[in-house]
Image: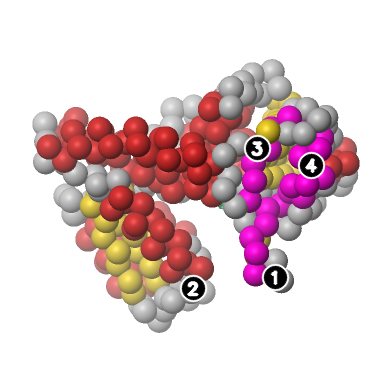
């Protein structure tokens, strides 16, 4: 069997085309969706991520505000900036690019974002709502994975879903979303005793460990759906995922490539969350 690759770029393009009407309607009513992206320091990878987010917003006809602060910014100054954005009527979504420098308490900053502008879905109020099955903002990467499964016609109900990775931004919310869709979910992590024992049982395997090509073809079930969230840069400078694409493609039914798989979906879901925030706000004020 040779798996079909799920094209994240094509799906992202299609979804973004669908946003145009929603953005235009909001703008016409005086509620042009606005996203503020806060970058602290000059980490090159973070600069690229922020530039991509700002460009995607502008291409979608949305307002974007980029706030750059020096790496040695006082935590109180960053906090004051977040509070000013909370009060800014033009801004519907606030994203603080992680990681923050070590002298800043990341949790305190994320907790200060107004829950109704928390388009990353990291605020405890939004996490709690997700746990209870009444989500407001769903973290962008796992939401992007769900959209990819929907597009590919994969219904998780009754399926064995195995997730490798238990981070707050990918693994844990991914598990919640799949439970919500009636999958039987197993979450593996760095202390899992026999990883392959679990991955070989998976009808749907989502890998988010940050370990280059750790999942090989002998670790997956024939006909599985394999979603590779990992983004790693090899010694040759090229990007690769957590899944060994060539050996897994020979066994799986559906697989996502890296690059061009989950990555483009993450920014697309950030736009979707910001548009949804603007629609909710417009509904409240008009
Ligand atoms: P993280 O470092 O916060 O978490 C990694 C998780 O993997 C941990 O729970 C850890 O227990 C688990 N893990 C590590 N080694 C393991 C092993 N050998 N066996 C089993 N589990 C293991 O990482 P994260 O933020 O969740 O990101 C994971 C990967 O996804 C990274 O490569 C990151 O770059 C990528 N990522 C991609 C996107 C995207 O848009 N495509 C978004 C976020 C993260």
Q: Is residue 129 visible?
A: no
Q: Residues within 10 Å of mark 1 (few under 14, many from 20)?
A: few
Magenta stretch in the rendered image: 237-258
Residue drawn 30% across the image and 50% down it = 59
Residue drawn 30% across the image and 73% down it = 77
Q: For marks 1 and 3, give the CA distance.
A: 24 Å
Image spot of residue 142 (x, y percent): 54, 40
Query: Mark 2 or mark 4: which comes first in sequence?
Result: 2
Q: For marks 2 and 4, give the CA distance.
A: 32 Å
Q: Is residue 116 above or below residue 71?
A: above
Q: Residues within 10 Å of mark 2 (few under 14, many from 20)?
A: few
**In magenta segment, residue 241:** yes
**Front-most of 52 and 32?**
52
Residue drawn 39% across the image and 56% down it = 53
Say which element carries label 1.
loop
Q: Which residue is mark 1?
A: 236
Instruction: Give the numbered dot on residue 44.
Output: 2
Instruction: Give the numbered dot on residue 5.
Output: 3
Query: Mark 1 or mark 3: which comes first in sequence?
Result: 3
Q: Is residue 119 visible?
A: yes
Query: Mark 2 or mark 3: which comes first in sequence?
Result: 3
Image spot of residue 174 (x, y percent): 59, 38
């Amino acid at each position: 069997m040779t798996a079909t690759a799920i094209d994240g770029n094509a799906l992202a393009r299609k979804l973004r085309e669908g946003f145009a009407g929603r953005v235009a309607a909001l703008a016409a009513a005086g509620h042009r969706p606005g996203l503020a992206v806060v970058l602290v320091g000059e980490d090159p990878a973070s600069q690229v991520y922020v530039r991509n987010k700002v460009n995607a917003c502008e291409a979608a006809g949305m307002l974007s505000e980029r706030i750059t602060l020096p790496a040695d910014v006082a935590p109180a100054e960053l906090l004051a900036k977040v509070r000013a954005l909370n009060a800014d009527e033009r801004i519907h979504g606030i994203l603080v690019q992680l990681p923050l420098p070590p002298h800043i308490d990341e949790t305190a900053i994320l907790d200060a974002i107004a829950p109704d502008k928390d388009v990353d879905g990291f605020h405890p109020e939004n996490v709690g709502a997700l746990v209870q099955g009444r989500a407001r903002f769903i973290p962008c990467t796992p939401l992007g994975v769900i959209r990819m499964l929907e597009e590919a016609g994969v219904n998780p109900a009754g399926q064995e879903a195995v997730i490798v990775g238990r981070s707050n931004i990918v693994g844990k919310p991914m598990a919640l979303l799949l439970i919500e869709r009636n999958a039987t979910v197993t979450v593996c992590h760095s202390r899992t005793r026999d990883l392959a024992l679990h991955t070989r049982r998976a009808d749907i395997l989502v890998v988010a460990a940050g370990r280059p090509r750790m999942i090989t073809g002998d670790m997956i079930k024939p006909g599985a759906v394999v979603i590779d969230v990992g983004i790693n840069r090899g010694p040759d400078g090229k990007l690769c995922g957590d899944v060994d694409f060539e050996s897994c493609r020979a066994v799986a039914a559906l697989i996502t490539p890296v690059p061009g798989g989950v990555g483009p979906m993450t920014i697309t879901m950030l736009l979707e969350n910001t548009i949804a925030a603007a629609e909710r706000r417009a509904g409240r004020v008009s």
